[in-house]
Amino acid sequence: MLTLLIPAALILCPLYIYPLAKIVALSFGSNPVSIQHYVELFSDPFLLRVFLQTLRLSATIALLCVVIGYPVAYAMRVASEKTQRNMVVMIMLPLWTSVLVRCFAWIVILGRNGLINDALRGTGIIDHPLKLVYNSTGVYVGMLHVMLPFMVLPLYNNLCRIDLKLISAAESLGSSRISAFLWIVLPLSMPGVLSGALLVFMGSVGLYVIPALLGGLSETTYVMLIEKQINELNNWELAAAMSVLLLVVTGLLTLLYERALNLDAATGFFGRILKGIFQQGPITLLIWRQRMLAKLPRWASGERSHRMQRPGARHGFSTTVAWIVIAALALPMLVIFPMAFGGDSYLTFPPRSLSLRWFENFFSRDDWVTPLITSFQVGIIATIMSMLVGVPASYAIVRGRFPGKGVITALLISPMIVPVVILAISLYALFAKMNLLGSVLGLAFAHTVLALPYVVVTVSAALRTTDPSLEAAASTLGAGPIRAFCRVTLPILKPAIVSATFLAFLTSFDDLVLALFLGGTNAKTLPLRMWEGIRFEIDPTIAAVSVMLICVTLTLKFIGERTAKRGAKAGRVAGAVGR
């Protein structure tokens, strides 16, 4: 089994482990080795302020996602099965859309002549346009739009494991609906709240694109400061120390996330703190509420309780909030599509005339077509390499039994957790020595590291649901290990492999940060060309490109989901035959 991990070792050791180790070594300086850069991180007022500002921004986004996401997840839980499926698809729809596309859409919506300002001026509410973008408002809106699904989906998964009949039982014993919710549902859902909040916090700390596009000079984040140290100040040693600090923060958050998923099994001092806050906390709030209600006149508290018990208002609040949030998540795409088909020379909504001129403009200009071809070249190479490496590695960690399997598994999926900016910086120095900067092959190697975790996670999940006795039966009939895998397991894994292939390709095709650092002028990808267009010009061609990217992404996702459903059905048939 260990031989199946050799391809992964050949990719990760030189392109992931070694560059990160070099960054750690560089952070201590050279001739002589010292910790002066780490001292500078906490003694320089500007560096410390940006670091704390980034943590505060991430914590605020996580808190807002909890407040907004909980009613959405609860409304999904109490809805019918058909409505649940539709809501899940609409919540996941932004995840299938490029971050660049969403940033461009919010610039159009929030700009001085954008949709919101035009609507407010048209109704006479304001006389002068509000500044809603290129400041903290734009950053908060963009980050909430990107990170909210990461809060809703884990919380919804947690709520689905709670039997809501417990609320009916509590109400039948005289409890109010709110008291039953606070006593039962909220404490039981706290692992989902904590895991979702940590997931949002981890993602927010390492975000680069949204603050850079939607924020102003005062909204500089830590990853933006790291990029400035490299590209503008050429201060590699300080940038390395900043990267290591960010890695440590990410690692600690990952450990917290793992503990949150197993809150009931948490032990020790840290476990007692988690249980005290997230299990006893809601009950404490309920006690305070009951004390406050006890001080109210009986007619006031009784009337309030009566209103809260009305059947018509049972889940009205959470359902209303859920559909408003879903509409807000879909708003950018609803705006982009009409604008892409506008016939005006500038962006207007709604368009005054319909035309395909911006699609024709895209395919007639080499500065757009060449990056598109480069993106396909890089994506195809990265997808092939990640599949050749990821599928054998997945088989080894699922079927194999060897020491250190947990460490190897964590190493295989860790590129998914490490901020992409740090990966880009570590590879920049390596590729500069190997003359791979600005090359399609170099960018494809970097994207292979980025896409590999998604292949491993997808294929491993499918392998765990595959009956290993089918391979054993083939072996007893004379088939060798390779033939048994190719004839028995591989056809069952086909849907997962197809999904992993599409996911790896989309991960490469959608990447901007690695292309920004490693692509140069000779390997400019489509996201990098869009980045330049959004930052330096608001060309309606970008709207046409955005629509094409959305259509390509949704088409690939549809094909992957369709194949997965067919494969799941075939797998159940094969399992029945095996039994």
Image (cartoon, rainbow, N blue to C red):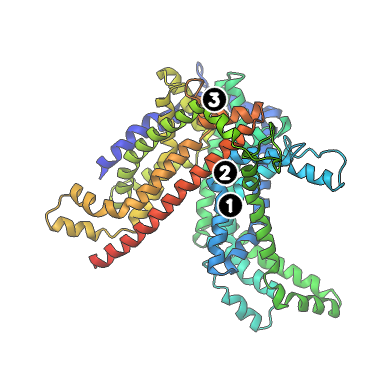
Q: Nearer the viewer, residue 186 or 295?
A: 186
Q: Give the Cα distance between marks 2 and 1.
A: 12 Å
Residue 548 position (above or below residue 93): above
Q: Which residue is mark 3?
A: 365
Q: Please, which residue is most extreme toward the top here?
A: 31
Amino acid type, callout 2: Gly
Residue 410: tell me if it is visible: no
Residue 133 position (above or below residue 292): above
Residue 225's label in the rendered image is none
Q: Are marks 3 and 2 in contact (CB under 8 Å)?
A: no
Q: Label 1's element?
A: helix
Q: Please, which residue is most extreme toward the bottom here?
A: 173
**Could you say where residue 494 lies in the image, as x and y percent from the top left?**
32, 51
Q: Which residue is mark 1?
A: 149
Q: Which residue is mark 2?
A: 203
Q: Nearer the viewer, residue 327 or 215?
A: 327
Q: Give the Cα distance between marks 1 and 3.
A: 36 Å
Q: Quadrant of residue 162?
A: bottom right
Q: Please, which residue is most extreme toward the left here?
A: 478
Q: Quadrant of residue 15?
A: top left
